[in-house]
Amino acid sequence: MVDTDSGWDGRGGRGSRGTRDTDGTWGVRGARAPDALPDRRVAAPDRRVAAPDRGVAAPDNRVAAPDLRAALPGRRVAAPDRRFALPGRRVAAVSLVALAALATGCEPGTATGAPEASPPVRPTQAAAPSPTRTAPVTEDAKPRTAPPPSPSASTSPPAPAPATARPAPEPSTAPPPRVLMRTGSESDRVRELQARLRQIGHFGRNPTGYYGSVTADAVRSFQAKRSLPVTGSTDEVTWQRLLAMTRVPKAAELRPPTERPLAAPDERCLKGRVLCISKNSRTLAWMIDGKVVSAMDVRFGSEYTPTREGVFEVFWKSRDHVSTLYDTPMPYALFFSGGQAVHYSADFAANGYGGASHGCVNVRDKKKVAALFDQVRTGDKVVVYW
């Protein structure tokens, strides 16, 4: 029987020329072929046995490499035998080992047939996956989790304020107290306000019912003394505080006599229907046939706009008149000399004799001058005298 894998052609004797082996190598001159046959026949079955192992190890080349070295001890034993028996064929043995390593898919340099190769892994250790051989866990292989919320995300709670920081006081959202009376108001409640302020020494005049600068100053004085907001207007807080400190005014306190002592009437006032006006006593007496029907306090113009003196007559009545020259109200106006007239003056009601008119005869009692306006007729006499 002829072995096709050997370098011997079956003819005895020493050949003068080497024959080519089936693996592509040339035999060594002078070597005895029969001496190598037993070892080579043993090695071949070992390679055939190793083939199934290489096929099994194919799914995982990294694990199969140690198994191949453990499963083929015969190759490592046979290789020294071949080197002992056939020192000339060392190159062929190395080629066979390299081919076997390439068949298993090992990386270059991980499996060699040299005796100084690293010792084989024990079968018990090869069965368990090695930590260094398992696929590394990457970020892509890890279960994806939501990234940590951004500090500016809407779901994040606001950053706590420093322990030493104190929150700024929030502005008060309570509406301001409702104002009940202010400068320009005119009513019976203003009269009551003035009477109550007079009881505790903040208003030094008789109530007039008109809220002027004198009343506003009296309210400011009261507010400042009671630690209230000093506005000069009577709001609900100021009014309730005043009601708690005073009593209900009597009728004489609400409407005291406003007439100053009447002077002896001018003789020109003793006949007919006459408005008898005295600059000396600063009074007006409405007289019919020498009899006083009503009397009231009046004030006159300043030295720059004096009230004319003499005998006149009412030529025009205007209930809701407004001065076109000074743009001021002149209610219940009874004109007697050009632009001069007897009329109600809110400023006189508020400030008293501290001011003056522009030549008119001012009345501070609105009810009395309103009643006078209804009684006086156009053509009635007006006497202004000292």
Image (spheres, rainbow, N blue to C red):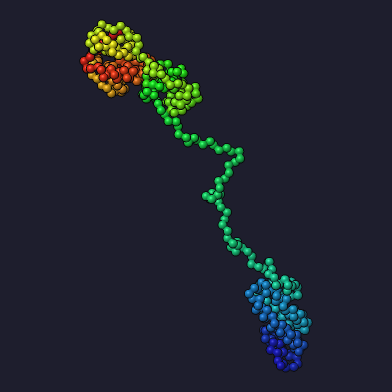
Task: Give residue 305's position: percent from left, percent from top.
Answer: 31, 14
Q: Is residue 10 visible?
A: yes
Left or right: 326, with 5 as reference point: left
Q: Residue furthest left?
A: 379
Res 32 → quadrant = bottom right
Q: Is residue 211 visible?
A: no
Res 27 → quadrant = bottom right
The quadrant of the picture occupied by the C terminus is: top left
Q: Nearer the viewer, residue 166 or 41?
A: 166
Vertical position of residue 287 compared to residue 143: above or below: above
For image coordinates 36% across by 24% down, the residue present is: 187
The quadrant of the picture occupied by the N terminus is: bottom right
Task: Give residue 113's position: percent from left, percent from top.
Answer: 72, 76
Q: Residue furthest right?
A: 84
For image coordinates 42% across by 29% down, the residue present is: 179
For image coordinates 32% across by 9% down, the residue present is: 262
Vertical position of residue 6 compared to residue 321: above or below: below
Vertical position of residue 102 compared to residue 5: above or below: above
Number of marks in the rendered image: 0
For image coordinates 74% across by 87% down, the residue present is: 37
Q: Nearer the viewer, residue 167 or 24?
A: 167
Task: Give residue 195's position: percent from left, percent from top.
Answer: 41, 19
Task: Give residue 347's position: percent from left, percent from top.
Answer: 35, 19
